[in-house]
Image: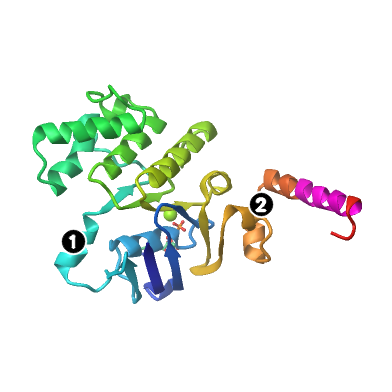
Amino acid sequence: MIEIHNIHKSFNGKKVLDGISGVFETGKTNLLLGASGTGKSVLLKCIVGLIKPDIGSVTFDGTYFTNNKLDIRQEIRRKIGMLFQSSALFDSMTVEQNVEFPLKMLTDMRKDERLDRVNFCLNRVGLEGSNTKMPSELSGGMKKRVGIARAIAPNTTYLFCDEPNSGLDPLTAIKIDELIKEITEEYNITTIVVTHDMNSVIEIGDKIMFLYEGKKLWEGTREDIMDSNVEELNEFIFANRLMRDAKKIEEEEEAQEHRQHPQA
Ligand SMILES: Nc1ncnc2c1ncn2[C@@H]1O[C@H](COP(=O)(O)OP(=O)(O)O)[C@@H](O)[C@H]1O
Ligand SMILES: [Mg+2]
């Protein structure tokens, strides 16, 4: 479980995060949802320690992180896997070398152990046998899969994904979302996914935190999100025509149910 408490961050006097607190649960895909420019990536960077918050703290499974001693911070960092928006693979390395890289950096595994682990992870993301391919030979979805394999290779405890399905076609996007959710549950990882995509909410939103102009305005599950009373959230959700139609159908069904059982 990751806990954040009262996170504030400004850049050049401009407030980007305005006192955000919350909990990200273990074994769940926790979504940070919101429109572009609302502070999602900055919050994620504050959590990983790439940006230092002006005020506030982050705790990983009870261990205080933000201003702790370097060795304790490094110990937590080792347990974090990141999937970046661009996949950020090393272009001059093969798929195998990309996934092996964090094992070389972070573990004292022998070469044969590393290769076993690489093959296990490639297998898990559906890329068995792609070891010798170069990133330039891969489709967008395959690059994300390599990115996921690399992120989980060193037995990751915490997985952070910033817009993991950006730039993918809708079907591939759903597959990547589902893969992240499955892996999260299988290995009991605490996963945070940054997204502005309502499809992700519907597919994988176990727990959702909605950000708006640097504040947390709502949190809940995908089951609750359509019924929120938060105006900014509703505007965000129902900007999508499909979501408006879905809401209308739901309301009509409820009205019909009420006509059939008026006392219910
Ligand atoms: N390093 C930085 N320096 C100055 N401003 C930044 C920096 N990083 C982000 N911002 C600003 O913070 C705001 C939120 O950005 P970001 O967290 O990237 O939004 P998003 O929700 O789209 O991920 C934006 O206005 C952005 O310009
Ligand atoms: Mg972003």
Q: Secondary structure at mark 1?
A: helix
Q: Which mark is residue 205?
A: none
Circle 1 or circle 2, nearest the eye: 1
Q: Which residues are magenta?
A: 248-259
Across and down, in percent, residue 105 comes to 14, 46
Q: Is residue 20 left or right of residue 160?
A: right
Q: Quadrant of ligand 2?
A: bottom left
Where the N terminus falls, by quadrant?
bottom left
Q: Earlier in the sequence, mark 1 or mark 2?
A: 1
Across and down, in percent, residue 96 comes to 21, 30
Residue beneath disc 2: 239
Q: Is residue 228 left or right of residue 158?
A: right
**Rendering quarter of residue 65:** bottom left
Q: Which coloring applies here? A: rainbow
Q: Secondary structure at mark 2?
A: loop
Q: Does the magenta run of residues contain 254?
A: yes
Give the residue at x 21% y 35%.
Answer: 117
Where the C terminus falls, by quadrant?
bottom right
Give the residue at x 19% y 31%.
Answer: 116
Q: Is residue 36 left or right of residue 71?
A: right
Seen from the viewer's position, the closer of residues 119 and 164 is 119
Residue beneath disc 1: 74
Give the residue at x 25% y 46%.
Answer: 155
**Rendering quarter of residue 71:** bottom left
| Number of marks | 2
- Mark 2 lies within 8 Å of ligand 1 (Cβ measured): no
Across and down, in percent, residue 257 comes to 84, 50
The answer to whether residue 92 is visible is no
- Figure check: 226 above or below 10: above
| Crowding at mark 1 (Cα within 10 Å: few <14, some 14-19, many 20+) | few
The answer to whether residue 76 is visible is yes
Task: Name the residue type under label 2.
Answer: Ala
